[in-house]
Image (cartoon, coloured by chain):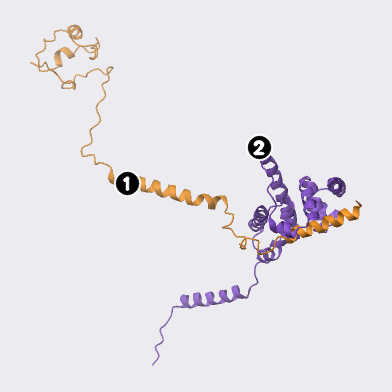
Chain colours: A purple, B orange
Amino acid sequence: MIFVLPMPPSLLRWMRGAASSRVVTTAAAAPAIYELYRERRLPLVRLAVLMVDDLPTAEDIVQDVFTRLYRRHGTSLDAVDDPNAYLVSAVMNAARSALRRRRIARAYLPPRPVPAPAAEDEALLGTGDHEVIQALGRLTARQRQVIVLRYWSGLSQQEIAATLGISAGTVKSTAHRALTLLRTRLEER
Amino acid sequence: MTETDLERRLREALSARATTVTSRDLRPASAPSRTAGRSTAARWSLPIAAGLAAAAVSVTAFALLRPADPTPAPPAAPASPSSSPSPSSPASPMPRSTEPEAPEVTPSAATRTTSTAEPTPTRSTPARTTLAPSPR
C-alpha cells in the first residue's frame, strides 16, 4: 500500500526551480576569466619573469592583474575588446612598477652582495645566455619592456606602442638605444 | 657583432630564461575571486560589526546593572534675592534657628541685624511689619 502525502504547491515550485537551476549550472560553460586564467597564467608569469627576473614577484604580479580584471569586469569579459592584449599591457605596467619600487628600495638599503645564481638556472642557461640576461637587467625598465616584447613576444613596433601606450617612434628609438647598450656590454666581456 | 647576431642571442637567451619556469614551479592555481582581493567595505565589515556588538553589549549591561535610585530628590527651590515677600506668604522658607530673635520693630532695624542675603524690604511694602507673623 502506498500513501501519497499532499505537498503544498509552493514547495513543489521550489523543488522544480532548484532542479532546473542545477541543470542550467551544470550545462553552462566555465566563465571566460577562468578559461583565460588557465590558458594564460604560465605565459604571463614567464613574461613577468623576463621583466623582474624573480619568480615569486612575477607570480604576484600576474595574480594581481587577474584579480583586478575580475574585480573590474567580473567573470564575463564581454566588455574587454582584447583580453590578451589587456593582460600583457597590465603585466608590463605592473612589472615596471615593481622594478621602480625595487630601485627605490635599493637606494635606501645598504648594498648587498649579488646572490649566486641557482644551480638549476646555471644548468639550463648557458654561459652566453646568462651574460645576455645579466646585461638585460642593467637596462632601464622601459628599454627592457621593449626588448622583451620585441624579441620574446614577437610584437611589431605598432603592437608594442599600443601595449605600452607610447608612440611608435619612441618604441623605435628605445629599442635602438637598448640594442646599442647591449652590444657594448656584451662586447666588453 | 652584427645586429642579427645580437638579435639571435637575445631571442635564445630570453627563450631559455622563460623555459626555466614551468607549471610545476608555480604555486597552486587559485582562480581570481572576490575573496582574493576584498573590497574596502568587505574588509571593514567585520571590525564594524564587532564594534557595534560591543557597543550594544555595553549599553545593555549599563541599563540592566545600573543602581536603582529609590527616592529622587525634589529639585530645590532657588533662592531669588530679588523676590519680595508678599503679605499672603505665611512664613519664610528659610530655616530659622531655635534661638529667640529680637523682635522686629521696623524694617530698617531688621535689615541691620540680618545678613545681606535676606530680602531687603523697601518702602513699597510697608505692610510687612504688621502682617508678618512674629516667631515668639
User: Closer to the camera, B104 or A62?
Assistant: A62
Choose top left, top right, bottom left or bottom right for residue B115: top left
Left or right, A59 with reference to B61: right
Give the vertical position of A31 relative to B54 (above or below). Answer: below
Q: Specify whether residue A167 is in view.
A: no
For residue B97, say whether it is visible: yes
Q: Residue at x 53, y 53 (%)?
A: B42
Amino acid type assigned to the residue bearing label 2 in the image = Tyr
Q: Position of residue A167 (x, y in %)?
A: 84, 48
Label 2 crowd (10 A; few <14 / some 14-19 / many >=20)? few
Residue B61's label in the rendered image is 1
Along the line of sight, the residue nearer the viewer: A38 or A27: A38
Position of residue A28 relative to residue B85, above or below, is below
Residue B99 as seen in the image, left or right of residue A146: left
Residue type at the position of mark 1: Ala
- Give the residue number, with chain letter if any, for mark 2: A108
Residue A16 at x, y = what percent? 52, 78
Residue visible at 89% across and 55% down in the picture: B5
